[in-house]
Amino acid sequence: MSSEEFEKLQEMYMSLYDELKLIPESALKSHGEERKKLVRTFDERHGEAEEVLQGMEEELRGAPSSYRNAMSAKLRLYRRDLGKLQRDMKNSTPGLSSYSQTVQGGHQSIYSSQNQQSTHLQSQRALLLQGTESLNNASQSIERSHRIAAETDQIGTDIIEELGEQKEQLDRTRNRLVNTGENLSRSRKILRAMSRRLMTNKLLLGVIILMELAILGAVVYLKFFRK
C-alpha cells in the first residue's frame, strides 16, 4: 500500500461527494417517485463513498509515518462532511427516512461482506509478501553462499599457485645445492691432488739435496784427503 493509492481513492471520494452534495437540494424540490429515486441514488452514492473511505482507512494503516497525520486529518474531514450530507438528506426527505434506513442497512451488509473479502485479500497478500520475502532471503543466502564458495575457490587456487612457486624455488635451491656439492667435491679432489704433488715435490727436493750433499762430500774427500 502507498500514498499514491490513497490519492486515487481520494479522487474517487471527491467525485462521489460532488455528486452527493447536489442531491439534498434537488430532493427538497421534488415529489413522489422522483424524490424516491433521488433517495435511492443518494443511498447508493453514500454507500460507495463509505466504501471508498474504508479503503482510505486501510491505506492509512499501511502508509509511512511521515504521511499518516495528514491522511488521518483528511479522513476525519471527509467523514464529517459525509455525515453532514446524510443529515441534510434526512431533513430534505422526512417522509422517506424509513426507506432510506432500509436501503442503507442493505448497503451496510454489502459493505460488511466486502470488508470481509478485503480483509481476506489483505491476509492473502500478507502471506504472499511474507513468502516472497522468505524467498528473497533464501535467494540472498544462496547468493552469499555462492560468493563465499567462489572466494574460497579463488583462495584455494591462489594457495595452489603459491605452493607451486615455492616448489619451483625449492627445486632451484636443491639444484644449486647439488651443484655446490659437486663443486666442493671437485675442489676437494683438486686440493688432494695438489697436496700429493706438494709432497712429491718435497721428496724430490730432499733427494736432490741429499745427492748434491753426497756429491759435494765426495769431491771434498777426493780433493783434500786422498793423495
Image (cartoon, helix red, strand yellow):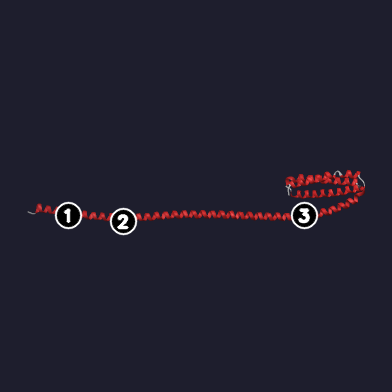
Give the residue number, with chain letter if any, for mark 2.
189
Nearest to the observer: residue 79 or residue 194: 79
State the image coordinates of residue 198 (x, y, percent, origin top left).
26, 54
Q: Is mark 2 on a helix, strand or loop?
A: helix
Q: Label 1, label 2: how many angstroms apart (C-alpha)? A: 33 Å
Q: Label 2, label 3: how many angstroms apart (C-alpha)? A: 103 Å
Give the residue number, with chain letter if any, for mark 3.
119
State the image coordinates of residue 34 (x, y, percent, origin top left).
90, 47
Amino acid at circle 3: Thr
Query: Quick check: marks 2 and 3 in contact, CB under 8 Å?
Result: no
Residue drawn 84% across and 44% down? 19
Amino acid at circle 1: Met
Q: Is residue 72 in sight in this rendering?
A: no
State the image coordinates of residue 183 (x, y, percent, origin top left).
35, 54
Q: Is mark 3 on a helix, strand or loop?
A: helix
Q: Residues within 10 Å of mark 1 (few under 14, many from 20)?
A: few
Query: Quick check: marks 1 and 2 in contact, CB under 8 Å?
Result: no
Image position of 196 (left or right of 52): left
Q: Say which mark, if any, is on residue 211.
A: 1
Q: Nearer the viewer, mark 1 or mark 2?
A: 2
Nearest to the observer: residue 61 or residue 113: 113
Q: Label 1, label 3: how many angstroms apart (C-alpha)? A: 135 Å
Residue drawn 62% across and 55% down? 142
